[in-house]
Image (cartoon, helix red, strand yellow):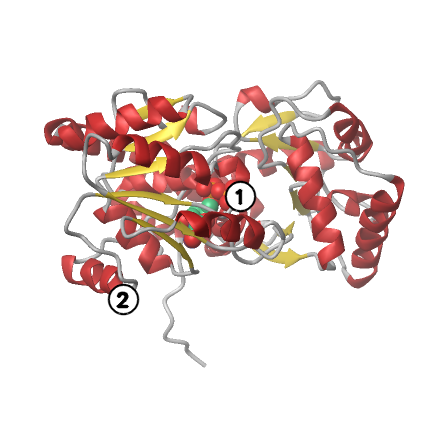
């Protein structure tokens, strides 16, 4: 039977990256044809990991590498504990008590009973499924891909997780500041965006207008936008404060759009804590809608990503790709996407963020200069074809070590 649903394929990228890059990618995929790979994480939606896996797995399949995507299941208790772990790895002084460790470990053990992971390559994302490696006989390399900002983790939580990580054959982090002293080879892969997704594809003025109207977003004043899971690390309150300060000098509307992720139980609480700040010019929306994300990132005069900690921050590249300057927290992967003063600004305080909002809103010429530069930087560095190639290089580097049967 023939299906008329066009799948994402690596060939789509030829129009952007050129044929030389594509041929190189196809060549690197050849030795891996018919190999099977599985990615395991803890949510199908909400957050950057799901965003990346939804396209990466299809592109890998289009290259002839059988690539699956599996989820671990867990109760709200489990995800409460793993969120605490996530917060601790990003530097909060949370401790995980013995009871919590038991719930974490037993949930992963239960998951191992339900799963068959006998692939040539197993890629485990983030700490939630990390202990799975304990319960399987390795058929090939197991890789731990950590998307979190590991620059200053809570020591006890790190020490608790480290023995699991040591079983892995490689660890991937986003930037060099997140590398750890550990006897596991470490690779640096920065995340990347899919320019053809609903979220990033071109939109007509008409489509943008429709999306904004449907959500009651006024366009009579310039839009300042932050799009993020409702998470304290993304500093939504700092964004509201910066906006209020900036508004003493320039007129604008702030839109905070957020969504929830299955593995982040704190979202609702953070969302509710923001609601008291709603006003005519401060719009706070909790809604899962990729076209709305796209429309807002395009229509915004300035996008903010004022994180306090950030693994990478895909929203920065998404906005830059659409030609919108970004003001981002001077942390984690944001510093690798924003070139201060070229395609946006890096800030370390609410005051800085407010000043930069004022500067950008007053200077249209600067915005348009940054717009061009932003898109170029994403085209050069942050498109999914680059990430695909890095995975291929990594998998190929194991071929000799593991001598996987051809
Ligand atoms: N996102 C979304 N809707 C929202 C908020 C976020 O689709 O209301 C998407 C956003 O566009 C990006 C991803 O979720 O693709 C967030 O990834 P990022 O790396 O910025 O942060 P994470 O949530 O992984 O910490």
Q: Position of residue 277 (x, y in %)?
A: 40, 47
For residue 87, side relative to residue 325 (left or right): right
**Residue located at (21% from left, 42% from top):** 252
Q: Which mark is residue 278?
A: none
For residue 176, side relative to residue 225 (left or right): right
The Cα atoms of the two marked residues, 1 and 2, are separated by 25 Å
Q: Secondary structure at mark 2?
A: helix
**Residue located at (56% from left, 55% from top):** 268
Q: Quadrant of residue 197?
A: bottom left
Q: Which mark is residue 231?
A: 1
**Residue located at (31% from left, 28% from top):** 354
Q: Position of residue 324 (x, y in %)?
A: 24, 38
From this viewpoint, which residue is outermost toward the left? 365
Q: Quadrant of residue 170?
A: top right
Q: Which is more toward the observer, 155 or 306?
A: 306
For residue 380, side relative to residue 396 (left or right): left
Mark earlier in primary sequence (1, 2): 2
In the rendered image, is residue 251 in sight?
yes
Quick one: quadrant of the N terminus?
A: bottom left
Q: Count of labels shown?
A: 2
From this viewpoint, which residue is outermost toward the bottom? 1
| Mark 1 neighbour class, 10 Å CA radius: few under 14, some 14 to 19, many 20 or more | many
Q: Secondary structure at mark 1?
A: loop
Q: Which is more toward the observer, 254 or 20?
A: 254
Residue that carries the numbered disc 2 in the rendered image: 214
**Residue located at (48% from left, 34% from top):** 312
Q: Is mark 1 within 8 Å of ligand 1?
A: yes
In the rendered image, is residue 382 in sight?
no
Q: Position of residue 139 (x, y in %)?
A: 77, 46
For residue 151, side relative to residue 127 (left or right): left
Q: Which is more toward the observer, 63 or 208?
A: 208
Q: Position of residue 30 (x, y in %)?
A: 51, 45
């Amino acid at each position: 039977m023939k299906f008329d649903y066009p799948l994402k394929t690596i060939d789509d990228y030829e129009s952007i990256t050129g044929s030389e890059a594509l041929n190189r990618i196809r060549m690197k995929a050849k030795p891996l044809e018919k190999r099977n790979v599985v990615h395991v994480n803890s949510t199908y939606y909400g957050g950057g990991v799901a965003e990346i896996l939804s396209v990466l797995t299809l592109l890998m399949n289009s290259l002839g590498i059988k690539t699956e995507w599996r989820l671990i299941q867990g109760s709200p208790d489990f995800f409460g504990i793993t969120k605490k772990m996530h917060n601790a790895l990003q530097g909060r002084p949370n401790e995980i008590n013995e009871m919590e460790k038991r719930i974490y470990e037993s949930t992963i053990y239960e998951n191992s009973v339900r799963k068959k992971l006998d692939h040539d390559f197993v890629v485990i994302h983030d700490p939630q499924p990390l202990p799975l490696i304990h319960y399987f006989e390795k058929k090939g390399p197991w890789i731990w891909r950590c998307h979190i900002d590991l620059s200053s983790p809570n020591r006890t939580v790190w020490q608790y997780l480290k023995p699991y990580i040591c079983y892995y054959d490689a660890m991937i982090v986003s930037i060099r500041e997140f590398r750890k002293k550990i006897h596991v080879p470490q690779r640096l892969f920065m995340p990347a965006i899919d320019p053809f997704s609903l979220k990033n594809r071109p939109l007509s003025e008409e489509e943008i207008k429709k999306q904004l109207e449907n959500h009651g977003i006024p366009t009579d004043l310039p839009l300042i936008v932050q799009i993020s899971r409702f998470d304290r690390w993304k500093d939504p309150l700092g964004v509201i404060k910066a906006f209020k300060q900036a508004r003493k000098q320039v007129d604008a509307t702030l839109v905070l759009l957020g969504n929830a992720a299955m593995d982040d139980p704190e979202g609702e609480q953070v969302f509710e804590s923001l609601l008291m700040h709603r006003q005519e010019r401060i719009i706070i929306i909790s809604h899962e809608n990729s076209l709305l994300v796209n429309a807002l990132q395009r229509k915004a005069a300035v996008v903010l990503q004022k994180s306090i900690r950030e693994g990478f921050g895909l929203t920065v590249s998404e906005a830059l790709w659409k030609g919108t300057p970004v003001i981002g927290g001077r942390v984690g992967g944001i510093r690798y996407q924003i070139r201060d003063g070229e395609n946006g600004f890096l800030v370390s305080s609410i005051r800085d963020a407010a000043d930069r909002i004022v500067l950008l809103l007053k200077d249209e010429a600067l915005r348009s200069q940054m717009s061009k530069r932003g898109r170029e930087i994403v085209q050069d560095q942050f498109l999914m074809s680059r990430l695909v190639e890095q995975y291929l290089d990594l998998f190929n580097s194991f071929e000799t070590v593991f001598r996987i049967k051809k």
